[in-house]
Image (spheres, rainbow, N blue to C red):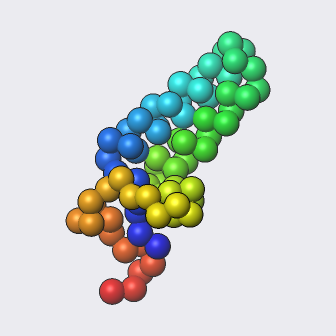
Amino acid sequence: MSRNVGTIDRVLRITLGLVLIALAFAGTVGPWGYIGLVPLLTGLVGRCPAYSLFGIRTCSAGDAPNLTGRP
């Protein structure tokens, strides 16, 4: 498995995830704000299952290391 989320996309996902979680924690948006865990985790891991399903990549080939452990 290789990464399919680029640097700018990762930063935006992490930021959005943290903001949503903070708003949920503060009680502003209710428990639905905890859905921010999804973009936070995909941003931290660098892989989005939905992108894989639709064949989307926002990172360049040089930014996508092979995460399978195989050469």
Q: Position of residue 67 (x, y in %)?
A: 42, 72
Q: Residue furthest left?
A: 62
The residue positioned 40% from the left and 63% from the top of the image is 3
Identify whether 36 is placed above or below 1: above
The residue positioned 76% from the left and 26% from the top of the image is 31
Identify whether 32 is placed above or below 29: below
Q: Residue furthest right?
A: 31
Q: Position of residue 61 (x, y in %)?
A: 27, 66
Q: Residue furthest bottom?
A: 71
Report the number of discs: 0
Locate residue 56: give its quadrant: bottom left
The residue positioned 73% from the left and 29% from the top of the image is 32
Q: Position of residue 54 (x, y in %)?
A: 52, 61
Answer with left or right where residue 46 lies relative to residue 65.
Answer: right
Dividing the image into 4 quarters, which one contains the C terminus?
Answer: bottom left
Identify whether 50 is placed above or below 65: above
The residue positioned 37% from the left and 74% from the top of the image is 66
Q: Position of residue 28 (x, y in %)?
A: 68, 13
Residue closer to the observer: 21 or 59: 59
Residue closer to the observer: 59 or 65: 59
